[in-house]
């Protein structure tokens, strides 16, 4: 399959398959259009995948189409990192570089030119989507898994009011304190702690102005990264206590895998729909 | 007389019929002496009046000849009304009724004035005809004539009502010299210029329009009066009609009565005649026989005498010896013969014995013509459905059509229900009608009624006894126990009657509709003291209950109001743990500060004894129910749902019969558990809810909890409700829970 760089803003349709009465279009980022989109504008829901995941992971594994079709949501699943930038060291490790963009706007060389995932997700991609698809720009939400979950939380917390709701599966909640985060942040952003904290959900909570945000986090109890201290949801919950309404569900027996996502994805989409269709 | 004329001249028929009608009933009521109520003189007089009117010169402006007839009519009417100067007004009267009221001595009922002139002509004509006719009064009261009268009456009656629907106020005609003011003094329209110098100089004038308005007002007032009069007259006529029928009936009955009586008398007389004739014949025969016998014996005597004479004469011619011999023998024989006395008394007198005729029985019969027989026993009707009220019944009976009854004696007493010592007094009342509403009775009670009829001759036997039942007392709605949801309401009530009633009826009125529109729906035939009624969502209903028995429905109960917004329930005090108190409105649960209770509480199947809890009474309707609970963030509480038979000696959520959110607050940490079967998912909630929304969804087998202040979904149980559940509330520490229900479900909760 031909892949298109995320940097190329022109849309080129790679595939279009009928799915749950809607169309699954792959444009380098995946867009699912529900049947409702044929007659009117629908809310947009952005899905951010986790480490090493491409959008195809989400499409094929999570089976979200039925819920999206039912609630009339356009789902956009961008790639997690720029592709084909040919930056040295890009493919050296799975948790940094290709597939692990960490959704930040890199400030460190050599990443600063191409690795601007945060701006892409919050600005460029929505503009592109709004311009080309029947979506309502006023109604958008964001959710994701693991690193994507972190990005979802960060995007929402950095842009009060931009997203109607934010949900996450096993998000990395406090990257400045976990091994992945330390590695990636220092690589992309350098060592300025304030710069790092600007992309840390747990720290962002403290600066969040009001509580008009409903956060749902599902976390597998058997998640190895949870026990490894990579995710640190407890820190985030503590930060949110009496400030931001979070429902944190520690799901017995689930790990970090896509099976976990698949189990609760419909629940999450329904939860988004509540806010987006309100 | 008059109706014959009417037959000849249809125009007159119309106008005279009411007169006839007016008279006829008097005729029927009164003696024939009064029938000459239309003496010739009268007719003639009236005719003259009419003629005088006709000949009076028309006044007013010069009009075209084609209009002449109309002008005449109008003019007459105007004249009659004393409105000579108001031509416009006069025109209006063409269609008015009773203009003749001032000249006619007769009631103006039903007179039609559409073609007055022609009518008058007819009138005149017929009056002439009447003069030439024999004015003797024909036999009144025959059925045919009565029929004629009634038809005539109806005709005019109909006409009268039709005509009053068209009042036409003609527009003022343009005159050549347009008058623009109205001279009040002369009562005529004039031109303003004339006012300055003419004879109107000193006169009061008003603008013509104003004069017209006031004149129209006046006319309208008159029209109104007339309308009223018409209504009165129509009422009067219908009353007359009733009287007419009654008279006909009464007299018919009397005719029958007379006929039967006179027949009886004639029969009696004929019988008496027969008897007398027979007796007389027998007497005659007897006498003749006696006389004949006497005659025969007399003849025999005569023969004997003659024979003796002959014998003696023969002896006289005999010789002496023989003579002496024979003479001695003869003398003996003669002596013997003469000794037998000849009866010359006439045994039978030719004249009659003085035989008095006994007419006493006939007299009695004659006397009885004007009296009537005592009535036979009336027939009492069974109770008519729905005829009773709580304190009264309407008893009806009928009489035999031949009977004449002056009054009835209606008696009743309560039906004995076998309870001794009670005073079952009989009551009796006298009524004139064949029905009676008996009041001041006890509700929902059987009474035995019987009736006797009475007239001046005597009293009838009593009718059969009929049992009537008073309607029940109105039930009493238990307003505090009403539960409702969006689709239905469960209404409970107390019977209000000691004895059982047949059924109950629930009446629903939608509150939006005005009171006048009344009942929109009734649910009937409810056997018990509660009913689940289907309703429309988000409406307000006023609900009444009636109790019914054979006698009919009770009065309405006091109203109760039901709102079908959200689900509405009260707490079930019977399940309430003794440490909890429920506020007056039934929706606030308080556990007050107190020392731990001394001793174990007795176990119970209905009352919570371990966890300090209470159940709510949710309406048993599947569907969605939503309510909210206001809590203190630091309070330890449990809220959720439980089956009614949830073990009362265990904590809520400790088994499979309840689903609950339990909040515990310890060392400044909040713990939220979603308990069912003692297990809970591991869920952390960062913002403590102060107002918890609970959505019970039978359709999707779900129970969801929400933080309502921030519209946050907290948790959803998937649960199988094999029977109805009830809201449950528990306080593990002193404090209070405030329940809000009867509120519509927020939109966001419907996503779960």
Image (cartoon, coloured by chain):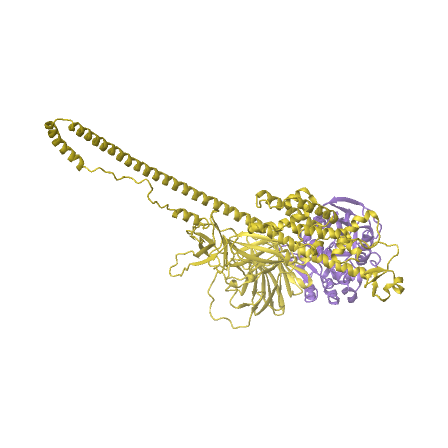
Give the residue at x 57% y 43%: B143
Indicate whether B266 appears above or below B751. Answer: above
Q: Nearer the viewer, residue B371 or B297?
A: B297
Q: Which quadrant of the view contains residue A140?
A: bottom right
The x and y percentages for residue A162 are: 77, 60
The x and y percentages for residue B375 are: 44, 50
Q: Nearer the viewer, residue B168 or B604?
A: B168
The x and y percentages for residue B350 are: 32, 40
Residue B148 appears left or right of B199 = left
Residue B327 appears left or right of B730 = left
Of all residues shown, which one is farthest toward the left?
B321
Give the residue at x 69% y 55%: B101
Q: Nearer the viewer, residue B204 or B281?
A: B281
Give the residue at x 87% y 65%: B201
Determine if residue B129 is in view. Answer: yes
Indicate whether A165 appears above or below A28. Answer: below
Determine if residue A95 is in view. Answer: no
Residue A135 appears left or right of B535 = right
Which image quarter is the N terminus of chain B in? top right
Give the residue at x 53% y 65%: B612
Q: Which quadrant of the view contains residue B726?
A: bottom right
Rendered hue of chain B is: yellow
Rendered hue of chain A is: purple
Which image quarter is the C terminus of chain B in? bottom right
């Amino acid at each position: 399959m031909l892949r298109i760089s995320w940097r190329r803003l022109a849309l080129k349709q790679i595939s279009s398959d009928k799915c749950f009465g809607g169309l699954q279009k792959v444009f380098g980022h995946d867009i699912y259009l529900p049947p409702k989109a044929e007659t009117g504008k629908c809310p947009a829901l952005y899905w951010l995948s986790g480490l090493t995941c491409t959008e195809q992971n989400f499409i094929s594994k999570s089976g979200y189409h039925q819920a999206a079709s039912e609630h009339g949501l356009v789902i956009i699943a961008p790639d997690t990192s720029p592709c084909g930038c040919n930056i040295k060291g890009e493919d050296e490790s799975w948790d940094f570089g290709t597939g692990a963009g960490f959704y930040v706007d890199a400030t460190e060389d050599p990443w600063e030119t191409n690795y601007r995932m945060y701006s892409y997700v919050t600005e460029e991609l929505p503009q592109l989507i709004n311009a080309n698809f029947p979506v309502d720009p006023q109604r958008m939400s964001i959710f994701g898994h693991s690193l994507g979950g972190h990005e979802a939380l960060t995007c929402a917390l950095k842009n009060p009011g931009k997203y109607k709701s934010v949900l996450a599966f096993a998000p990395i909640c406090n990257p400045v304190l976990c091994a992945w985060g330390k590695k990636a942040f220092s690589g992309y952003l350098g060592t300025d702690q304030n710069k790092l904290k600007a992309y840390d959900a747990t720290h962002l909570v403290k600066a969040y102005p009001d509580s008009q945000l409903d956060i749902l986090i599902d976390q597998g109890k058997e998640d190895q990264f949870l026990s490894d201290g990579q995710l640190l949801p407890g820190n985030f919950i503590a930060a949110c206590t009496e400030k931001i309404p979070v429902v944190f569900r520690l799901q017995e027996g689930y790990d970090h895998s896509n099976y976990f996502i698949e189990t609760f994805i419909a629940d999450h989409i329904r939860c988004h729909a509540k806010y987006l269709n309100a | 007389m008059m109706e014959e004329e009417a037959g000849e001249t249809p125009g007159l028929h119309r106008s005279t019929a009411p007169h006839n009608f007016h008279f006829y009933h008097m005729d029927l009521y009164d003696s024939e002496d009064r029938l000459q109520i239309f003496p010739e003189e009268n007719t003639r007089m009236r005719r003259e009046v009419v003629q005088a009117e006709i000949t009076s010169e028309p006044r007013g402006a010069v009009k075209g000849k084609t209009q002449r007839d109309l002008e005449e009519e109008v003019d007459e009417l105007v004249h009659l009304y004393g409105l000579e100067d108001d031509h416009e007004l006069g025109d209006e009267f063409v269609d008015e009724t009773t203009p003749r009221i001032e000249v006619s001595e007769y009631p103006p009922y039903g007179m039609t004035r559409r073609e007055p002139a022609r009518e008058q002509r007819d009138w005149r004509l017929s009056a002439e005809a009447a003069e030439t006719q024999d004015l003797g009064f024909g036999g009144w009261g025959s059925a045919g004539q009565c029929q004629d009268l009634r038809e005539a009456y109806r005709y005019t009656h109909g006409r009268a009502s039709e005509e009053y629907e068209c009042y036409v106020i003609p527009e003022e005609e343009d005159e050549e010299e347009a008058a623009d003011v109205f001279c009040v003094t002369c009562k005529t329209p004039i031109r303003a210029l004339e006012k300055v110098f003419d004879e109107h100089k000193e006169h009061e004038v008003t603008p013509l329009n104003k004069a017209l308005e006031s004149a129209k007002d006046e006319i309208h007032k008159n029209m109104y009066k007339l309308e009223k009069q018409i209504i009165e007259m129509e009422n009067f006529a219908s009353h007359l009609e009733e009287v007419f029928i009654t008279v006909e009936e009464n007299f018919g009955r009397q005719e029958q009565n007379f006929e039967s009586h006179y027949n009886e008398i004639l029969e009696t007389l004929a019988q008496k005649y027969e008897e007398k004739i027979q007796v007389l014949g027998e007497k005659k025969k007897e006498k003749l026989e006696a006389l004949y016998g006497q005659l025969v014996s007399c003849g025999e005597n005569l023969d004997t005498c003659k024979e003796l004479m002959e014998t003696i004469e023969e002896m006289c011619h005999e010789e002496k010896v023989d003579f002496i011999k024979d003479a001695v023998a003869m003398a003996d024989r003669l002596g013997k013969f003469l000794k037998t006395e000849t009866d010359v008394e006439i045994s039978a007198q030719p004249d009659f014995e003085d035989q008095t005729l006994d007419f006493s029985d006939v007299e009695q019969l004659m006397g009885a013509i004007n009296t009537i027989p005592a009535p036979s026993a009336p027939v009492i009707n069974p109770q008519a459905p729905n005829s009773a009220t709580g304190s009264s019944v309407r008893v009806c009976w009928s009489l035999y059509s031949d009977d004449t009854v002056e009054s009835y004696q209606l008696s009743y007493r309560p039906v004995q229900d076998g309870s001794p010592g009670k005073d079952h007094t009989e009551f009796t009342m006298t009524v004139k009608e064949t029905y009676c509403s008996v009041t001041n009775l006890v509700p929902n009670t059987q009474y035995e009624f019987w009736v006797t009829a009475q007239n001046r001759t005597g009293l009838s036997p009593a009718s059969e006894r009929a049992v009537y039942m008073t309607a029940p007392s109105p039930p009493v709605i238990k307003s505090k126990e009403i539960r409702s949801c969006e689709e239905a309401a469960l209404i409970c009530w107390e019977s209000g009657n000691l004895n059982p009633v047949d059924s109950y009826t629930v009446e629903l009125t939608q509150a939006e509709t005005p009171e006048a529109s009344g009942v929109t729906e009734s649910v009937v035939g409810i056997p018990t003291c509660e009913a689940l009624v289907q309703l429309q969502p988000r409406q307000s209903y006023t609900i009444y209950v009636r109790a019914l028995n054979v006698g009919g429905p009770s009065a309405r109960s006091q109203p109760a109001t039901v709102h079908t917004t959200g689900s509405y329930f009260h707490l079930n005090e019977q399940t309430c743990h003794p440490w909890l108190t429920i506020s007056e409105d039934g929706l606030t649960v308080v556990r007050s500060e107190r020392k731990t209770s001394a001793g174990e509480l007795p176990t119970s199947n209905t009352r919570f004894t371990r966890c300090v809890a209470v159940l709510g009474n949710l309406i048993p309707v599947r569907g969605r129910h939503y309510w909210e609970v206001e809590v203190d963030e630091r309070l330890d509480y449990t809220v959720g749902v439980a089956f009614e038979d949830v073990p009362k000696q265990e904590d809520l959520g400790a088994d499979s019969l309840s689903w609950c959110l339990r909040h515990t607050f310890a060392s400044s940490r909040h713990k939220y558990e979603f308990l069912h079967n003692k297990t809970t998912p591991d869920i952390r909630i960062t913002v403590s809810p102060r107002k918890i929304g609970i959505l019970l969804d039978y359709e999707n087998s779900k129970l969801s909890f929400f933080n309502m202040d921030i519209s946050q979904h907290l948790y959803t149980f998937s649960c199988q409700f094999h029977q109805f559940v009830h809201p449950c509330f528990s306080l593990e520490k002193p404090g209070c829970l405030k329940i809000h229900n009867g509120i519509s479900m927020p939109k966001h909760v419907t996503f779960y």
